Image: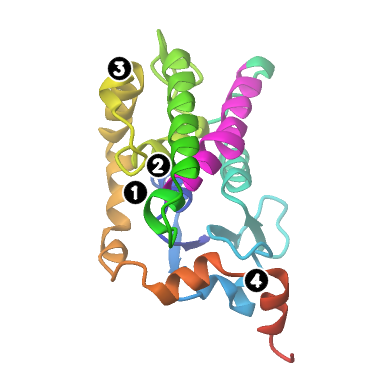
Amino acid sequence: MIELFYWPTPNGHKITLFLEEAGLPYRIHPVDISAGDQFKPEFLAISPNNRMPAIVDTEPADGGEPLSVFESGAILLYLAEKTGQFLPTDLRGRKTVLEWLFWQMGGLGPMAGQNHHFNRYAPEKIPYAIERYIKETNRLYGVLDRRLKGRAFIAGDAFTIADMACHPWIALWQYQSQDLDQFPEVKRWFEAVMARPAVARAYELGRDLSKRPAVTEEGKKILFGQTAATLAANRPGN
């Protein structure tokens, strides 16, 4: 059983996409990031960066004690290796999938995330920051569009963890001030992935949680106002 600590964000969706595609048994534990659930000591014990998603594998391959994994890219890689699915075993195929997985982790996710922040959540509109992240997101869409030309999926003919990592971030293209019609290969790929039954099920899992009230001003302080000092001050015993 996979215990999944989750909230319906792009990084959270990555893991439900994998679990639904692979057919692994799992149980969702909601982590309401606007309420500060990610800072609770019991969650910190499995995710020391105070970020979801995280998992606990109650039946790891080595037969030992339950094993926790944090960081969405690491979780995808762990699950792919556990199941033998969605990651090629040949040297070159594996190398390609990992390149694009890390491209998402180091580029598309962080840049689109800053795009969301300065466009939607920042208390003041800073034109330079908004323009900078919209343009960088646009550049990355262009990189992905070129990569997909002549390929069904990011790494080639097979659907892999690279697609699972990227798709939930592209799903928010409107929030990022992007136009999918400008990127026909991305649009074709995006729609093909969305049409997969397991992908549709994965996104549906988060819909009820997504209906909760929008991020409040207090929620923004929790999400965006933490420092090492404030986290230390809020730990039990201080």
* Cα distance between the residues tagged 2 and 3: 17 Å
Amino acid type indicated by mark 3: Pro
User: Is residue 231 a member of the stretch shown in magenta?
Assistant: no
Q: Which mark is residue 184?
A: 3
Numbered label attached to residue 202: 1
Tell me the mark number nearer the camera, choosing from 2 and 3: 3
Mark closer to the chain start, 3 or 4: 4
Q: Which of the two marks, 1 or 2, is nearer to us in this view?
A: 2
Residue, disc 4: 44
Circles 2 and 3, Cβ within 8 Å, touching? The answer is: no
Residue 168, label in figure: 2
State how far apart marks 1 and 2 are (Cα). 11 Å
Position above or below: 96 against 75? above
Labels in figure, total: 4
Residue 72 is situated, as x and y percent measured from the top left of the image, at 56, 48
Q: Which residues are magenta?
A: 93-116
Which of the pair 43/236 is nearer the observer?
236
CB atoms at circles 3 and 4 under 8 Å apart? no
Which amino acid, by three-letter code, is at mark 1?
A: Ala
Residue found 33% across the figure and 32% down from its top: 178
